[in-house]
Image (cartoon, grey):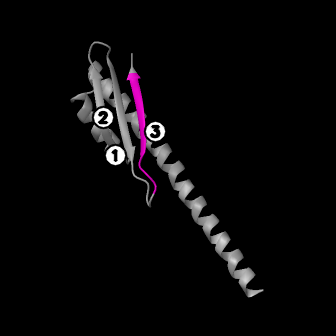
Amino acid sequence: MTNLVVGFCSIVFVLVAAIGSLSQAFVAHSRAQSAADLAALAAADAVRGLATGEPCETAKEVAKRNGGRLKDCRASLGEQSAYVVIEVDIPGPLPKVREEAVAGR
């Protein structure tokens, strides 16, 4: 009987840990998407002259303030648009979350 209880408790513990890891991944995905959207909008505003500063530096600062890290940024004066790629770390062994966004056009 004791072995069954220990086994059952172990299974419950593993399931709770897995659910916790998945929850962290979902939160990181949401944070990365929000940071990417805001960084792209800020860069596009800088391209259009609606905000001061260099577009990719503005995007980098906005991404950092929102918990992300700017991995790629392309701003087009001709199209008045911006493209950004943002990464967010997930605590634990899971890989980083990467999101991209485009603003303008």
Please give left or right for residue 26 compared with residue 31 in the image. right
Q: What amino acid type should be assigned to the residue bearing mark 2?
A: Asp
Q: Is residue 38 magenta?
A: no
87 w.r.t. 94: above or below? above
Q: Residue furthest front?
A: 3
Nearer-the-camera pick, 36 or 61: 36
Q: How far apart in space, not on screen, are marks 1 and 2 (Cα)? A: 17 Å
Indicate the quadrant where residue 74 lies: top left
- Specify the label residue 72 is tagged with: 2
Nearer-the-camera pick, 6 or 25: 6
Q: Residue at x 39, y 15 (%)?
A: 105
* Main secondary structure along the magenta-highlighted residues: strand
Please give left or right for residue 104 compared with residue 47 in the image. right
**Element carrying mark 3:** helix
- Specify the label residue 33 is tagged with: 3
**Element carrying mark 2:** strand
Q: Residue at x 34, y 46 (%)?
A: 65
Q: Which residues are magenta?
A: 94-103
Q: What amino acid type should be assigned to the residue bearing mark 3?
A: Gln
Q: Residue furthest top?
A: 78
Nearer-the-camera pick, 17 or 84: 17
Q: How far apart in space, not on screen, are marks 2 and 3 (Cα)? A: 14 Å
Residue 101 position, x and y percent, is 41, 30
Between disc 1 and disc 3, the foreground one is: 3
Please give left or right for residue 27 compared with residue 104 in the image. right
Between disc 1 and disc 2, the foreground one is: 2
Mark 1 highlights which residue? 65
Q: Residue furthest right?
A: 1
Q: Are marks 1 and 2 in contact (CB under 8 Å)?
A: no
